[in-house]
Image (cartoon, grey):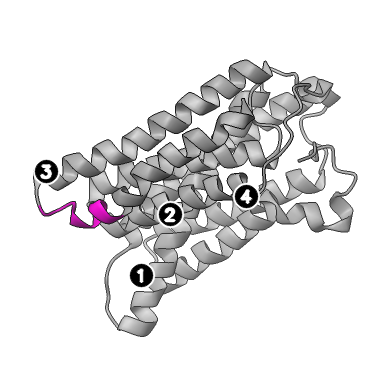
């Protein structure tokens, strides 16, 4: 099925590239909104169809390798952008989410993988799919919140404007944190089934907990109505750096080479 990836990816590129432009005019008229919605969702349909066909062809969920997970990030990020532009009318945000989706698609075009149909015993669990998918969804929302924090800090330090990005960041973080929490729970249940323990302090598990706690700190400070929004935006940026370490940075740490969470690809 992978030999047809270029057809689906170019079809997706063909609708998402113009969508990156049309979303900037989202507030202009109903016609612009409809055009943007159709272009964004068409790409989602193309990519969803490819993932479904690939799932059927492999006989397993396409979630094992980094290349396969990039497909899901390319799918989820524009969906997050679509939700935000419908709710907040921030065309720049939707444009960014589409751009990031395109980046993931292009990486897979430039660096194709050999997709093994086999699935190692530890991954043959009912918890495999929900655990990985909720984490991908969570990372997509939290990655989007990192963009908001970056833009918010830019406005405060360089534009000298007190534009309020807190509410938008909160919505994204609450959604992402919810998925992150589900990911930890599903991961614990999966670990109990596969290895007999809910938690083993494996490097990946440890960094997942550190990331979860970092976002918990942000939520706590926002809940207590910390007036200095600049501080919370910086915390959000640091939390995302920790997330990046947990996501793929951990693979380069010597302590992680014997991790049970390194499955290849």
Task: Decide which of tag 2 and tag 3 comes sooner along the chain.
Answer: 3
Magenta stretch: dominant secondary structure:
helix
Structural distance between the alpha carbons of marks 4 and 3? 35 Å
Which quadrant is the C terminus positioned in? top right
The circle on residue 227 is 1
Above or below — where is 119 with respect to 180? above
Measured in 3D between alpha carbons, the distance from the residue under mark 2 to the one under mark 3, in whole angstroms, is 22 Å
Q: Is residue 22 left or right of residue 42?
A: left
Residue at 36% in and 50% down: 17
Percent across and percent down for residue 80 are 39, 43
Of callouts 2 and 4, which one flags the residue occurring earlier in the amino acid sequence?
A: 2
Q: CA distance from mark 2 to mark 1?
A: 33 Å
Residue closest to the eye, 75 or 226? 75
- Give the residue displayed 20% in from the left and 42% down from the top: 35
Q: Quadrant of residue 224?
A: bottom left
Give the CA separation, mark 2 to mark 4. 16 Å
**Numbered badge on residue 31:** 3
Side of 142 where 209 appears, left or right: right
Nearer-the-camera pick, 260 or 27 = 27
Which contiguous range is marked in magenta? 21-28
Q: Residue 27 lies in magenta, yes or no?
A: yes
Q: Which mark is residue 110?
A: 4
Query: What numbered label is drawn on residue 99?
Result: 2
């Amino acid at each position: 099925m992978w030999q047809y990836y270029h057809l689906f990816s170019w079809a997706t590129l063909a609708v998402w590239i113009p969508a990156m432009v049309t979303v900037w005019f989202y507030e202009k008229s109903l016609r612009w909104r409809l055009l943007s919605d159709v272009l964004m969702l068409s790409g989602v349909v193309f990519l969803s169809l490819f993932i479904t066909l690939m799932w059927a062809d492999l006989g397993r969920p396409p979630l094992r390798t980094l290349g396969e997970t990039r497909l899901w990030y390319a799918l989820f990020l524009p969906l997050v952008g679509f939700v935000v532009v419908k709710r907040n009318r921030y065309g720049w945000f939707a444009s960014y989410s589409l751009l990031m989706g395109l980046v993931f698609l292009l990486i897979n075009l430039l660096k194709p993988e050999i997709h093994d149909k086999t699935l190692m015993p530890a991954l043959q669990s009912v918890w495999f799919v929900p655990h990985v998918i909720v984490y991908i969804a969570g990372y997509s929302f939290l990655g989007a919140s990192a963009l908001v924090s970056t833009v918010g800090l830019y406005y405060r330090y360089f534009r000298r404007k007190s534009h309020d990005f807190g509410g938008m960041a909160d919505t994204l973080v609450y959604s992402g944190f919810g998925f992150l929490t589900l990911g930890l729970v599903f991961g614990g249940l999966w670990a109990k089934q596969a290895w007999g323990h809910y938690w083993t302090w494996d490097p990946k598990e440890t960094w997942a907990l550190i990331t979860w706690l970092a976002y918990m700190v942000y939520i706590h400070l926002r809940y207590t109505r910390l007036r200095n929004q600049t501080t919370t935006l910086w915390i959000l940026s640091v939390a995302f750096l920790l997330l990046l370490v947990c996501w793929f940075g951990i693979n380069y740490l010597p302590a992680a080479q014997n991790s049970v969470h390194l499955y290849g690809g």
